[in-house]
Image (cartoon, rainbow, N blue to C red):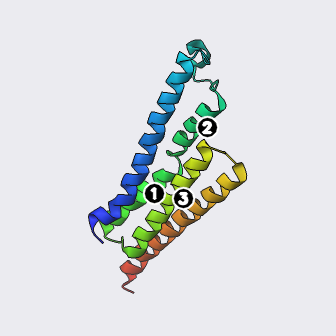
């Protein structure tokens, strides 16, 4: 697979993270300007934000949890040249699930639905890691 094909899902995941960051910042600034939140109420990092603003912040923070394993895996797959079409398809599926997860988190925030999508993304990422590890170990054996 080409490097652009392998990295395209990473770029989308990074774009999602920056989108949520800017949306969070805009929402927070708006709440402060409207007087809904006072600076002293958030000065120590306390979660005194309105529900929607906190949901956006939570979705943003979530991009630094499981996706870190995705980033590491893509880097390792590139270095070891173990990223094939199946890897890229799974990467796109993982990122699509992350986008849906963030959408649910920042809108309806239906926890059951959000968890289902999270679980799908986690299982895809787990499968990607298992297949990658198998390719690494079986390549060493010469199978």
List x then y, in percent, for residue 45: 57, 23
Residue picked out by circle 1: 70
Q: Which mark is residue 97?
A: 3
List x then y, in percent, for residue 119: 63, 60
Residue 49 picture quarter: top right
Dot 1 falls on a residue whose secondary structure is: helix
Q: Earlier in the sequence, mark 2 or mark 3?
A: 2
Contact? badges 3 and 1 (CB < 8 Å): no
List x then y, in percent, for residue 84: 36, 74
Q: CA distance from mark 2 to mark 3?
A: 18 Å
Q: CA distance from mark 3 to mark 1?
A: 13 Å
Q: Earlier in the sequence, mark 1 or mark 2?
A: 2
The residue sitting at 70% across, 49% down in the picture is 111
Q: CA distance from mark 1 to mark 2?
A: 23 Å
Task: Say above or below: 47 vs 13.
Answer: above
Residue picked out by circle 2: 55
Q: Residues within 10 Å of mark 3 (few under 14, many from 20)?
A: many
The residue sitting at 35% across, 59% down in the picture is 8
């Amino acid at each position: 697979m080409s490097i652009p094909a392998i990295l395209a899902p990473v770029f989308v995941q990074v774009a999602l993270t920056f989108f949520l960051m800017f949306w969070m910042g805009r929402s927070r600034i708006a709440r402060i300007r409207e007087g809904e939140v006072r600076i002293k109420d958030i000065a120590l990092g306390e979660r005194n934000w309105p529900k929607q603003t906190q949901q956006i912040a939570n979705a943003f923070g979530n991009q630094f949890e499981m996706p870190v394993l995705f980033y590491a895996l893509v880097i390792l797959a590139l270095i070891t040249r173990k990223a094939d079409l199946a890897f890229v398809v799974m990467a796109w599926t993982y990122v699509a699930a992350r986008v849906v997860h963030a959408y649910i988190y920042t809108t309806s925030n239906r926890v059951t639905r959000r968890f289902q999508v999270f679980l799908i993304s986690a299982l895809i990422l787990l499968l990607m890691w298992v297949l990658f590890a198998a390719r690494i170990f079986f390549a060493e054996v010469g199978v």
